[in-house]
Amino acid sequence: MTEAQRREYEGCLIRHARKSDLREVYLIEIKSFPYPYPVESLATLLLLFPKYFFVAECSSRVVGYVAGALNKDGSGHIMSIAVLPAYRGRGLGSRLMDAIENAFRKDGISRVYLEVSQNNKVALNLYRKRRFKVISVRTGYYPDGSDAYIMFKEIRD
Ligand SMILES: CC(C)(COP(=O)(O)OP(=O)(O)OC[C@H]1O[C@@H](n2cnc3c(N)ncnc32)[C@H](O)[C@@H]1OP(=O)(O)O)[C@@H](O)C(=O)NCCC(=O)NCCS
């Protein structure tokens, strides 16, 4: 990491998302996923679950986000997380996960689920490191017919 990158990274903050962030969040989404969420879906997540939608901001630029939701049974669901390619590998994904897990915990939500592509080794590493466990496979989950792992974590104080 260069000195300039180190200074920029140290200046990054994790904060709740605002409606005005959605355009940048959508740009991150399309740079990160073969099948991005439409911007309307991101806007709906922000409208319904603002407490569980965070962005990483570096030098006034939104470079990462995580969005969560509540399942009908009251458990938490991590719907999506992504960091712009140039900002990956510097701990921002972990900080975003800290933020959403803490927000769930604060609301007394102790069970958290997410889906991840079986081929997404980086994300699997991130989640396994945070003690998410694969509990089942959802066949044909992605538009190309590939399967997803469903992962689960019990979070406690
Ligand atoms: C997954 C993603 C959000 C991680 O963000 P990040 O800011 O790079 O993550 P961090 O720097 O905090 O790294 C956290 C952990 O992820 C794993 N990881 C990160 N980069 C990795 C790489 N290049 N290779 C393997 N594992 C990696 C490691 O376990 C790492 O922990 P460590 O640094 O202690 O080894 C990011 O890679 C991304 O946006 N990917 C595209 C979108 C995506 O796949 N989202 C997940 C959908 S389920």
Image (cartoon, rainbow, N blue to C red):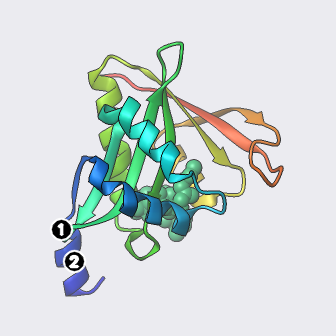
- Residue type at mark 1 is Glu
**Residue 103: horizontal and vertical position, in percent?**
30, 31
Could you tell me which residue is drawn at 77 percent across and 51 percent down?
A: 143
Q: Which is more toward the observer, 22 or 123?
A: 22
**Residue 74: horizontal and vertical position, in percent?**
47, 15
Work out whether 51 lies above or below 80. Answer: above
How many other residues sit within 10 Å of disc 2, few (<14), some (14-19) or many (≥20)?
Answer: few
Q: CA distance from mark 2 to mark 1?
A: 6 Å
**Residue 55: horizontal and vertical position, in percent?**
31, 53
Residue tagged by mark 2? 6
Instruction: Say if mark 2 contacts mark 1, CB within 8 Å.
Output: yes
Can residue 52 be seen? yes
Could you tell me which residue is drawn at 22 percent across and 77 percent down?
A: 6
Work out whether 97 lies above or below 108. Answer: below
Residue tagged by mark 1? 10
- Residue type at mark 2 is Arg
**Disc 1 element:** helix
Work out whether 6 lies above or below 137. Answer: below
